[in-house]
Every structure is written in C-alpha cells, then in structure tokens.
Amino acid sequence: MRRFPDQRVEKAGKTSILLVRPSPLDPRQGLLQMGPLRLRCALGKGGVSTRKREGDGATPLASMRLLSAYRRPGGRGGPRFALPTRLTRASDGWCDEARHGRYNCPVRLPFPKSAERMMRGDRLYDGVVVLDWNVTHRARGLGSAIFLHVARPGYAPTEGCVALSRGDLDRLAPHLHRGMRLVVRR
C-alpha cells in the first residue's frame, strides 16, 4: 500500500462512503478508501461473504450505515469520533447469543448468555464504530457485533469486523459522521 505525502483526510471533505475492498492476494486483508485516502485494513478470517452467519468469521458484503461509536475513556483512550459516542464502561457488552432476545444489542455485564466485552484487555475496542449490520432490523443468526475497530498487530484477521491501525482510526474518527456508509465490495 502506498500513501502520497499530500494525501490527507481533510481532502475527503464530507465524503459519505467508506469503501472497503479485499486484497486479491489475501481476502482477509484489504483497503479502506475515503475520498483519495487509502488505508490498509484487516477483514474477517472467513474473507468477505454475501451469506453472513453468526460465527462464520466473514465480513459481510454489504452497505452499512455508521450508527454510533464507543471510545475508551482516559488520556490515551479511544479516538474522538464525530458520531454519537459513548464512553466504554467495564460493564458494557454486546450480546452474540443468536437465541437470546437481546441478540446483536448492547447489554450490561455480567450477562446470562454469550456476550462480547466492550472494554477489552487487548485494546482492540479502544475505538469502535457500530455498523448497521443486522442491528436496526435484527434477524437471529445473521451475525452480530460487526464493527469498525482497532486492528491487531500485523493486521491479523478479525471475526468479521473491519479493523484499522490505531493511528489510522484516530486520524479518520473526526471525519466519520451520521449519514456515512461503510460499503464492502469484492
């Protein structure tokens, strides 16, 4: 991936699309594009899929609205988003139990069924953008907790999310606003 010195987020202005395409060399990695800016990203360990299912590790091939954000509190907490943002608490979780009524919704921990912890020790969720995959119109088993978040070292594959380096997410965060979409294509 190549970045040009004059390539800045500010040039993207009020771009309403974040376009994600998998790499032809490794479908578990890709490029996220916002206007002229191109950033390396990690994708799901199952690549990109039109038939997303809970636990398949795939990133959905879809156009998803950016709904809201979570950020870790503190000095070197999470990125400063332009989206509606909640400071993450130790009790914040996200239900991933397909048979539960709170499936693919935020929950308070401890939770009686399976739920992701939003305040993670590995800091991958220091900054999280909630994407509208199976959120506003939920269907059980079609995948949960599809986020834009911080990537693991080396851009290791995710469980289905799109992940950027911490620096790239920090840089992009102030330009992510309501009305934007993250579009995953082949």
Image: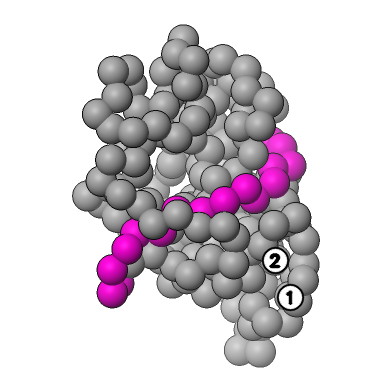
**Residue 61 lies in the magenta-colored region:** yes
**Residue 169 lies in the magenta-colored region:** no
Residue matched to label 2 = 34
Left or right position of 94 against 135: left
Image coords of residue 154 (percent x, y): 37, 57
Amino acid found under the numbered disc labelled 1: Ala
Extreme top residue here? Answer: 99
Whether label 2 touches label 1, CB < 8 Å: yes
Say which mark, if any, is on residue 96: none
Name the residue nearer the viewer: 4 or 123: 123
Q: Residue at point 54% right, 16% down?
A: 141
Name the residue nearer the viewer: 128 or 58: 128
Name the residue nearer the viewer: 30 or 63: 63
Image coords of residue 28 (percent x, y): 51, 43
Amino acid found under the numbered disc labelled 2: Met
Q: Is residue 168 visible?
A: no
Residue matched to label 1 = 12
Left or right position of 131 against 111: right
Q: Residue at point 32% right, 63% down?
A: 73
Magenta stretch in the rendered image? 60-76
Instruction: Please report whichever mark, 2 or 1, sits nearer to the chain's N-terminal start.
Output: 1
User: Callout 2: few (<14), some (14-19), or many (20+) C-alpha neighbours within 10 Å?
Assistant: many
Name the residue nearer the viewer: 34 or 68: 68
Image coords of residue 145 (percent x, y): 48, 35
